Image: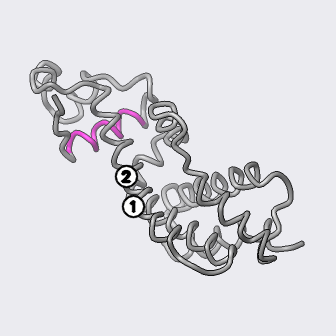
Amino acid sequence: MTVAVDETLRTAAIAVLAEYGWAGVTLERVAEKVGRSRVTLWRQGLTVEALLNSLLDALADDYRDTMWPVLAGSGTGREGLIRAIEALFDVIDRHLPLMLSSDLVFHQEQARNGPVSFLDPFERFLRDGEADGTLHPHGRVSDVAEVLMVSAAFTYVHMRGRHHWSRSRARRLTLDLVLRGVLEA
């Protein structure tokens, strides 16, 4: 039985996650945040796993749906990489409270579903850019993709969520910073 997880419960789960970490999310703590009893949530069929899966499903689905047009687009490797980073920022903006709650969000999704690769678009465009001469990854492409994606994602998350920078300011400066490492030969 699939249980619907409403936005109030998701918000409460994110708050508990931010305070106690992945292992500290309990129905009791979530129920307390929403002013309900743990038993009420349990009777509705809600579990901690369903709550956390709901958050991760929404993120993974949004990421996949946002990246698909980027991957289907044309242009140089550099143009594709820029579009992929901008798409990543779009996803982060829609899931900023979750992203701020833990730096393990992407790892939790991979642990849950196996090799769900958030890195694939970055690896692809780095390879394309290396082949067409518009990008110059210095090292193994898979390693550079991982550093680039994590650097872009968590710098953006931090500047948006902790420093309250505007979207345009955080995007412009983060994009400029992470691209510098792959533009020069």
Describe the element under mark 2 as helix, strand or loop. Answer: helix
Q: Tell which residue pokes out farthest to the right in this image.
A: 185
Figure check: 8 above or below 66: above
Instruction: Estimate how packed mark 1 is, as few (under 14), some (14 to 19) or many (20 or more) residues with alpha carbons within 10 Å.
Output: few
Residue situated in front as seen by the camera: 121 or 164 = 121
Q: CA–CA distance between discs 1 and 2?
A: 6 Å
The label shown at residue 18 is none
Residue at figure coordinates x 48%, y 57% from the top left: 161
Figure check: 77 above or below 16: below
Residue situated in front as seen by the camera: 183 or 40 = 183
Quadrant position of the N terminus in the picture? top left
Q: CB under 8 Å between callouts 1 and 2? A: yes
The stretch in magenta equals 8-17
Instruction: Estimate how packed mark 2 is, as few (under 14), some (14 to 19) or many (20 or more) residues with alpha carbons within 10 Å.
Output: few
Q: Position of residue 70 (x, y in %)?
A: 51, 70
Q: Amino acid at mark 2?
A: Asp
Residue at figure coordinates x 41%, y 46% from the top left: 98
Residue at figure coordinates x 22%, y 39% from the top left: 9
Q: Position of residue 23 (x, y in %)?
A: 44, 22
Q: What residue would you read off at disc 2?
A: 61
Tell me which secondary structure the magenta stretch mostly adopts.
helix
95 left or right of 7?
right
Q: Position of residue 36 (x, y in %)?
A: 13, 29
The figure's colour scheme reads one colour
Q: Amino acid at mark 1?
A: Asp
Q: Quadrant of residue 130?
A: bottom right
Q: What residue would you read off at disc 1?
A: 65
| Residue 165 lies in the magenta stretch | no
136 left or right of 176?
right
Q: Position of residue 162 (x, y in %)?
A: 52, 55
